[in-house]
């Protein structure tokens, strides 16, 4: 006999519906852009009616806002899970390299969705604070990782960790765009290569005696 499937609670069913709508929207935004995708298309791709969409989201902007938050938190949780149990910094870098190589297999879709969400938020003023919150979360994660790395090396950060985190975050976006447009000669884990180089350079700067090289 086939085991009886557990019946979902109302809240579980609601979360399942929202998850499918978000997944369908992510696919369509990647394919057609946010402005090129209608509520009806999202509902149809997810296997629901237009009414199901509006039963979960006030409008498309509300869905974009949740997708921004969900995407950021999911990626941060993935990276934390990969690195938190690493026995050494080199092990953590190795885990990050593997994660970046896996992302490279679907980089066009990943980057297209990121750019679409950013552009839509820039064009809709009410979404900009949420985009700013998303970017700040990512920058804070970079800053925290740098602080831990500096502490492990017994040095103080050579500048405000928040500023260094901003540099790493901005560099990541730029490197991924270059990797997509000109893949020849740019490795899948170029972001980790750049992070490692910056960290070694900043560590050397932090170890430099005060005033050395000035003037």
Image (cartoon, rainbow, N blue to C red):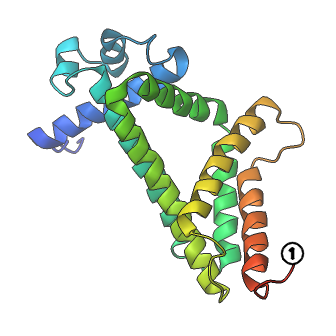
Q: Position of residue 209 (x, y in %)?
A: 78, 88
Q: Image quarter for residue 158?
A: bottom right
Figure check: 146 above or below 186: below
Outermost residue, front direction? 215
Query: Which residue corresponds to the image point at 22% horizontal and 45% vertical from the top-left?
Result: 3
Side (left or right) of 118 relative to 103: left
Q: Image quarter for residue 202?
A: bottom right
Q: Nearer the viewer, residue 61 or 167?
A: 167
Outermost residue, left direction? 10
Q: Position of residue 110 (x, y in %)?
A: 58, 35
Q: How many numbered marks are there?
A: 1
Task: State the SS at label 1.
Answer: loop
Figure check: 25 above or below 165: above
Outermost residue, right direction? 185
Q: Which quadrant is the N terminus positioned in?
A: top left
Query: Which residue corresponds to the image point at 76% horizontal and 36% vertical from the top-left?
Result: 178
Residue of label 1: 215
Q: Which quadrant is the C terminus positioned in?
A: bottom right
> Is there any visible trace of residue 103 in the rendered image?
yes
Q: Nearer the viewer, residue 17 or 110?
A: 110
Side (left or right) of 2 relative to 168: left
Query: Which residue corresponds to the image point at 46% horizontal and 10% vertical from the top-left?
Result: 36
Q: Nearer the viewer, residue 182 or 17?
A: 182
Other-residue count near label 1 (Cα within 10 Å), few / some / many at <14 / 14–19 / ≥20: few
Q: Position of residue 127 (x, y in %)?
A: 35, 31
Figure check: 126 above or below 135: above
> Is there any visible trace of residue 78 in the rendered image?
no
Query: Which residue corresponds to the image point at 13% horizontal and 42% vertical from the top-left?
Result: 11
Q: Position of residue 120 (x, y in %)?
A: 44, 24
Side (left or right) of 109 relative to 199: left
């Amino acid at each position: 006999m086939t085991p009886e499937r557990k019946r979902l609670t109302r809240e579980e069913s609601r979360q399942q519906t929202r998850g499918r709508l978000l997944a369908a929207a992510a696919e369509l935004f990647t394919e057609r852009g946010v402005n090129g995708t209608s509520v009806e298309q999202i509902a149809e791709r997810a296997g629901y009616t237009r009414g199901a969409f509006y039963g979960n989201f006030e409008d498309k902007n509300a869905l974009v806002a949740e997708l921004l938050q969900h995407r950021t938190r999911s990626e941060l949780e993935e990276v934390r899970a990969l690195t938190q149990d690493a026995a050494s910094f080199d092990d953590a870098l190795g885990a990050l390299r593997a994660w970046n190589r896996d992302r490279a297999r679907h980089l066009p879709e990943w980057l297209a969705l990121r750019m679409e969400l950013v552009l839509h938020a820039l064009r809709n003023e009410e979404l900009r604070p949420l985009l700013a919150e998303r970017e700040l979360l990512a920058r804070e994660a970079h800053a925290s990782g740098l602080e831990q790395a500096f502490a492990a090396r017994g040095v103080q950060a050579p500048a405000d960790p928040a500023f260094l985190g901003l540099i790493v975050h901005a560099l990541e976006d730029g490197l991924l765009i270059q990797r997509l447009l000109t893949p020849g000669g740019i490795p899948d884990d170029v972001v980790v290569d750049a992070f490692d180089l910056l960290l070694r350079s900043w560590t050397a700067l932090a170890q430099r005696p005060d005033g050395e090289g000035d003037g």
